[in-house]
Amino acid sequence: MLHAAPLILIYGDSLSAAYGLPAGQGWVRLLEQKLAPQYRVVNASVSGETTAGGLARLAQTLQQHKPAIVLLELGANDALRGLPLVQAEKNLADMLKQSRAAGASTLLIGMMLPPNYGAAYTRQFSDMYQRLARQNNTAFMPFLLEGFAEKPDYFLADGIHPNAQAQPLIAKQVLQQLQPLLKQKTKRQ
């Protein structure tokens, strides 16, 4: 009997759902192409998703897909909407715990806010991800848009969502962060 390739679940918001791009141009699809056939990739990202929304649908998603690895990229919409960061942090911690309880390794992908949100709030937001990674002993990628966030040429007209030119950069950076988890999973098989 053939065993299916291990599954990597991408669980995020519009940045992972390839908002505003034609099908197949997002970083998740590019990552999938690099990892196939050794791994399957499922993108369960939803544009506009908050941590509360993600938490509400995670148990069913984990049960449906039974991932070996979960990449969790949520929280930006909570901050953009001014939702309490204490609740976002609790939701993210619960999602990390549920993922591990389902047998998956986890990679927490952080975000940063633009400076117009104020120094204190942007620092609290960034610190939230670092604290979560440390307290939950999870692999951590501090910033999904590292290296190009300040370059307008890499964004759609809204200035928020990465364009097609940025997607290969994101895929490359995520793959680098994912490599240690892939090696761990290979050793366990």
Image (tube, rainbow, N blue to C red):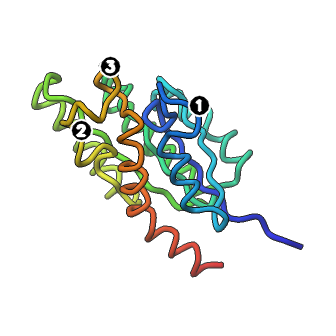
- Per the model, the C-alpha gap separating discs 1 and 2 is 30 Å
Front position in the image: 156 or 99: 156
Identify the residue at horizontal 67%, vertical 41% (top origin): 61
Residue 137 visible? The answer is: no
Tag 1, which secondary structure? helix
Identify whether 89 is placed above or below 187: above
Q: Residue at x 37, y 38 (%)?
A: 89
Can you identify the residue that label 3 sits on? Answer: 158
The crowd level at tag 1 (other Cα within 10 Å; few <14, some 14-19, many 20+) is: few
Measured in 3D between alpha carbons, the distance from the residue under mark 1 to the one under mark 3, in whole angstroms, is 28 Å
The residue tagged 1 is: 56
Which of the image's four quarters has the N terminus?
bottom right
The correct choice, above or below, for 108 with respect to 12 in the image is below
Q: Amino acid at mark 1?
A: Ala
Judging from the image, what secondary structure is the residue with disc 3 in? Answer: loop
Quadrant placement of the C terminus: bottom right
Q: Nearer the viewer, mark 1 or mark 3?
A: 3
Which residue is painted at 47% across and 32% down in the image?
13
Mark 2 or 3 closer to N-term? 2
Q: Amino acid at mark 2?
A: Ala
Q: Nearer the viewer, residue 110 or 170?
A: 170
Q: Residue 127: percent from the left, percent from the top?
A: 22, 44
Q: Hey, which residue is sitting farthest right in the picture?
A: 1
How many residues crowd around disc 2 within 10 Å: few (fewer than 14), some, or many (20 or more)? Answer: some
Spot occupied by residue 66 in the image (x, y as percentages of width and height): 70, 54
What residue does disc 2 label? 149
Q: Is residue 52 left or right of residue 90?
A: right
